[in-house]
Structures are given as structure tokens and as C-alpha cells.
Image (spheres, rainbow, N blue to C red):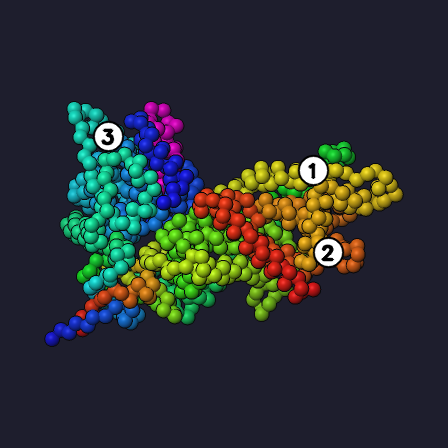
Amino acid sequence: MEIDATTEIASTQIESSSTHKNKILLVGFPNAGKSTLFNSLTGGNRKISNYSGITVDSAIGDFISNDETGLNRLELIDLPGIYNLNPSSQDEGVTLSALLHMSDGPTGDLVLAVIDWHRLESSLTLVVSLIDLLGTDKVLAVINKDDERELSAQERLGLEQKLGIKILPISAINTDVSIIDHFIREQLDLRNTKNSSRETFDIQTKNLMVSEDALSYIPNLTSATGHIQVHVAPDKNEISKGINEKHQMVRKILSDVKGPDLAPSQLSEKIDKVILNPVLGMPIFLSIFYFIFHSIYTWAGPVMDLSEDLVGKLGEVIGQNLPQGHLHDLVVDGIIGGVGGVVVFLPQIMILFFLLSILEQSGYISRAAIITDRFMSFFGLGGKAFLPYMSGFACAIPGIMAARTIPDHKERMATILTLPLITCSARLPVYILLIGTFVPDYTIWGIFNSRALSFFFLYFLGSIMALIIAKILRLSFFKGRTGNFIIDLPHYQRPHLRIALKQAWFKGKTFLRKAGTVILGLSIIIWFLSTFPGPAQEDLIGKTQAEQAAITLESSALGQMGKTIEPVIEPLGMNWKIGVGLLVSFGARELFVSAMGTIYSLGDVDEESSTLRERMKAEINPLTGRKVFDLATVWSILIFFVFSLQCTSTLAILKKETGGWKYPTIGFSYMLAIAYIGSFITYRLLI
Amino acid sequence: MITNTYMTITDLKTGQSATLINLGDDPAIHLKLLSLGLLPGDRITLLNRVPLRGPLSIKHGDTNYFALRYQEASHIEVELKA
């Protein structure tokens, strides 16, 4: 059984809780609004999504109100969504494990059950199961209300009385956080005071029946606190029978306490008639994604030109004020050339995440999973692999973690080994630099932009290759049937711009932090390696300034490395300078842009071309007299970046998720092979 | 006289309603459907079909929507009261 490190952290922290530091565990259906609640209570900024399994890692956060004087320290734990107490994936197992590790005693931890108004009956059934397992002392509930209808005070009181727990109606997006915070603290204090005044307190041992399969998904089962005994059900119908009975019970309660519903909104149904239409479904899906790439390109253009100009100006101003010498070169060529070259892509990153957030909030993602399921299952993956793939467009790391929601081990392995082929946002700077500079801008068929279409093609190419490799894996090493695919479809919602903007802002900050730390550090190293060891002085005598710069770069450590691999990449149409960019990009893809920035600043003597793009355009191969970056070379580099796994963080997460270096090595090697062959073919076709 | 016709969800026409009779033999699917609140005796309506035997989207009661694969739906028995 695989035990991942994060689960261990979550469970040990729950165990170590003392009476003064209570933990609140958020439990509920997937997409019930747990993550939104977590964000408001802790001030953390987590993704809010409408598709099962976005909470891929249990997250722990301190209540914001902990800072106020006189209040106890409380911790909130956001757990993966569950439908029942019989886990059917690794992800659901984490939640059950956390419940089994709750602290015992009269003043122990609490579960805050999140009830979804749209799925009132089934989420209440889960609450009833939780109360059954933990007792009314350990469960509180919030009910996510709807725009159209909310629980009346009378209905709430009726429910509280029947269930024996307190319920607070909230709106995860609009309700004042202090009301929820106060509710939790008040109920916790009341319970603690009541229990502390008792003379004796018996901890009852409860039994939990799970299926045999479920047992293998529960991590750290043996270290559980022990007041819940987990048994394997003797008969497979036993568990179904239990859930059925609880459902009937909840139906009875609801019919007793709840007034009639308003006429249901037909809007979701009407939208689905179009979105899931047999003829229109696929074209709509493709249009939405084309629109995203189109926006990234066209909306960001003006902003990017502006930030490029600013970076260029900054370099000039600082350059004029620093005395000539190594320090001048380090700052202007290394830092501004390297970091500045990457930072200009901030608008694109923010637009990508803004649009993905809008899409996630709307409820369209589940529909996209349905539309693509037939297609995905042809390649041996289920609709459940869609979300991890989708996250992969942002970054492979959350995507690989999201794959934990895939119950079948072999399907999960095929998904995570192919996920790095999905075009992530780190490839974006490279694509934009090369496409934006070298692909001519014109309109195709009256509506498509040549550059936007080039983008779309690269994204498509990565995705289709991921599926093809997945199919090969599913026919060989990871043979087997795809798991079941039953998903609930959330009602369509008007996306909140505020949430999307926050998401974009947050991702933008993360990107800038990376640029300010990792990229900055590595840019400085790249500058040193491309400046030292310098050439012998006599080699520089009688040469022009441009020739001197070129000789310096060639004799540097990085230049030597580039020269060493030149014979290998020469068939791909690349020279040693591009080779230097490729070498450093294996640390992180954006470094290709930084390295180009540094290299082309070093060689730059032309005062007119202040931006990297202009410098790259101007470079001439001294042997052939042709431009170094012709279309064949540019596409060859692009294809290399589509397929190659140039990301140390991805390799690290692959190692963590698969428990060794075997699969990261396999992933890295096969992707490098495809990248090389792909680039070779592209170059030969276009030259 | 009332005649009962036994069939599976896949036999329904788009827009047609039926009563759930049997959730099928696969324990995992059975449990998932139950947890979503689909109990034998409930009314469902087939809303959309994705072409080439793709997933089907279904309405349960008045406000719940969900989707499942053709293959899975073909094991779920429903009854059409004529």
C-alpha cells in the first residue's frame, strides 16, 4: 500500500492536538464549497472548482481570527470530497483516514460538514453517516444556500432537532466570514464547557464497515486512535443496504421538516441541451479552448509590448549609470536580460489562469469531461483523467497530484506518466517568444489568426501525443479496463470575476516569486558561466567589439558546453547558442528565454535593437549568411519544447507519487526521444 | 390494463422518464449511484446522449443532474409505465 507523505503530515498533526488547539475538519461532497470556505476562514488562496477532486491534498490552515486576543488557536483542515464512508480512491481514503485519526475525548476535534443545497438529500445522508460514526458531539454543519431558495428558520430548527447537531446556513462566497467563525467557536466552547463539567466521560468504541477494496485505499489505518474499529463487510450488499437505509431515513426527515421547493430552474437543462448536443457539443468544446489561446495571444500583446519596453528602458537607464566592467555586465546582461526576459510574460500567465478560473467556476469542466470521455476512453483513459490533464495546462505538478482521484492504479500511472506532455504554462514564454517573433502574422480563412492557430496547434500536438502514449501504456505495461465514470453535474453558475481575478493575481505573484528567486539565481549563474573563463587577451586584439563579445561567449564554460553538444543538435537545425538555451532549460523551461536574453545581451552591440526579439531576428549565421532563426529552426525548437520534459520539479513530484526514480527516468527518456525525433523530422520537412 | 416494460437506461429515448428498478451487479457502481441518492423506485429522465455510445446525462428528481457511461447505464434496469 502506498502511503504518501502529505497524508502522514495531516494525520500526525491531527493526532498531536491538545485540548487547547482544536482541529476543524472540513468534510463534504466534492464541490460542496469546502475550498471556498477554507479560503475565507484561513485567508489562504486555494483553487475553487466545480469538478470532482480539486482538493487533491489535504490542506491545513490557521483561522485568521486566531490572532485576536482571547481566542483559542484553531486549525482548519480541508479534506478531499467524499460521497460515503467507503473510499473508492486514494483521495477519498485520505479523508476517511483523517476521520479515524481525530482526537478522542470530551473536548476533541470537530467535523464541519458542508451540505450542498442542490444535493440536500444525499449530502445529508453523508452527515447522518458521520454522526453515526462520531457522535453528535463531534459534528457541526453548514449548509450552502442557493440564490433562489434558502432554508427557513423553521426548517433549520426542524433539521437540527431531528439530527441532533447545529446547522448554519451560509453562502460560501457572500457570507461574512466572522459569522461562520463565530458559529464554530461558539459551538466548540459550548460543547467543551458542557463536557468538562461532566464527572465521567465514556468514549464509546464505534464500528465502521467497509468493503475489502476500500481497505487498501485507507492510509495509516493501524495508527488510528482506536475509538473506531474498521471491519471488512462480510457481504458485499451490506454496505449498500446501510446507505439505502440512511437515505430512506433522510427522506423521511426532509418530508417532515421541509416545505415545498420552488419550481426548479430550467436554466441548467436548457444550457446542457446546447452544450451536450450531439452535433454542437464537440465544436463548442473546441471553440472554447481556441478562444482561450486566442485571448492569451491577442489580449496580452499590447501589455507585453509595454512591459518589454519598460524592461528595455530599465536596462538602458541602469546601464548608463553603472561604470563599465563586470558588475555592469552582470546587472544589465545577466539580471535584466535574464529575469526581465521572463517577467514580460506575466500578462499571459495571468490571463490563462483568469480564464481557467472562469471556466472552472461556471460548471463547464464536468460537461467537457463528458464530451471528451468517449475520446479519452478510446485511448484507455476515463473521463476521470480529464481534470488532471486539464490542470496540466496550468502546470504538470497539480495535475499529477489531481490524478490521485483516479481509483485504478494502472490508469493512474498511465495518466501521470503522460501528463508532462500536456502544454504547461512554463512553455508559454518560449512559445510566445518564438511564435510572436518569427511566425508571420496573418488571417487564415477569414477568422483564424496564424499565431493563435500556431499556439492551438502546439497545445493540440502535446495533448494528442499524451493520449497516444497513454494508449500504448494501456496496451502494454499498464493493461486493464478503465474505471467507472459516474459524475454529478453541478448547476451552471455565473462565474465570479472577483474570484477569477484573485486567482490570476495569486498565480501572477507565484510566477513573479519564481522569477525573483529561482530564475534570478540561475540567471546569475548563467551569466557567470557564459562570461568565464574569458578568452586570452591576445585573441581580442584587433577585433571589433561584436567579434570580441562573440569570442568571449564562445570561450566561456557555457559556450564550451554548447559547442560540445552542437554535433548532436546540428541535425535539428540548432546552433551552439540555442544548445546553451536547451541545456539550461532542463532546469526549468523559462530558463531558455533567460539564457537567450543573457546570450543575446552579451553579443549585442547594435544600439537600435533593445529587445531580445529584435536581436534574435537580426542574427546571421556567419557560415551560410542566412538568418539563424529561420522558420525551420524555430519550429524545430518549438517541437522540442512541446515534447521534452524539461522541469526538475515535475521529476521530483513523479518520484514522490510513484515511490522511486524508475518512472521519472522512464518519463524523462521517452519524452526526450520523442522531442529529438520530432524536431529532426520537423526541421527536415521545413528546410 | 397496465403493462410493464423492463429495459435499461440506454433503451430510453432522449427526454423520456422512467423508474429505477435495479442498479446493476457491479458493487462499485451500485454504491456510487446509491451515494448520489439514486434509489430503486426513483424517477429519472434521460436528457442528453453523447454520440458514438458516449456518456448519457440524466436528471434525477427535479434538481439533480448526473452523467454516466453508456456501458454503465446499460446495466441499470428501469421500468416504463405504459
The kind of secondary structure element at disc 1 is helix
Q: Earlier in the sequence, mark 3 or mark 1?
A: 3
* Percent position of residue A132, x then y: 20, 42
Determine the chain carrying the residue at label 3.
A
- Give the residue pinned by disc 3: A105
The kind of secondary structure element at disc 3 is loop
Residue depicted at x 21% and y 58%: B39
* Percent position of residue A634, x then y: 66, 57
Does mark 2 fall on the same chain as mark 3?
yes
Q: Is residue A314 in sight in this rendering?
A: no
- Give the residue pinned by disc 1: A528
Q: Earlier in the sequence, mark 3 or mark 2?
A: 3
* Percent position of residue A424, x then y: 53, 51
Does mark 1 fall on the same chain as mark 3?
yes
Give the camera-side residue of A623 and A428.
A623
**Is residue A411 in the magenta section?**
no
The kind of secondary structure element at disc 2 is loop
Residue depicted at x 35% and y 36%: A11
- Mark 1–mark 2 Cα distance, whole angstroms, equals 25 Å
Mark drawn on residue A628:
2
Q: Amino acid at mark 1?
A: Phe
Q: Amino acid at mark 3?
A: Gly
Determine the chain carrying the residue at label 1.
A
Mark drawn on residue B24:
none
Q: Which residues are magenta?
A: A60-79
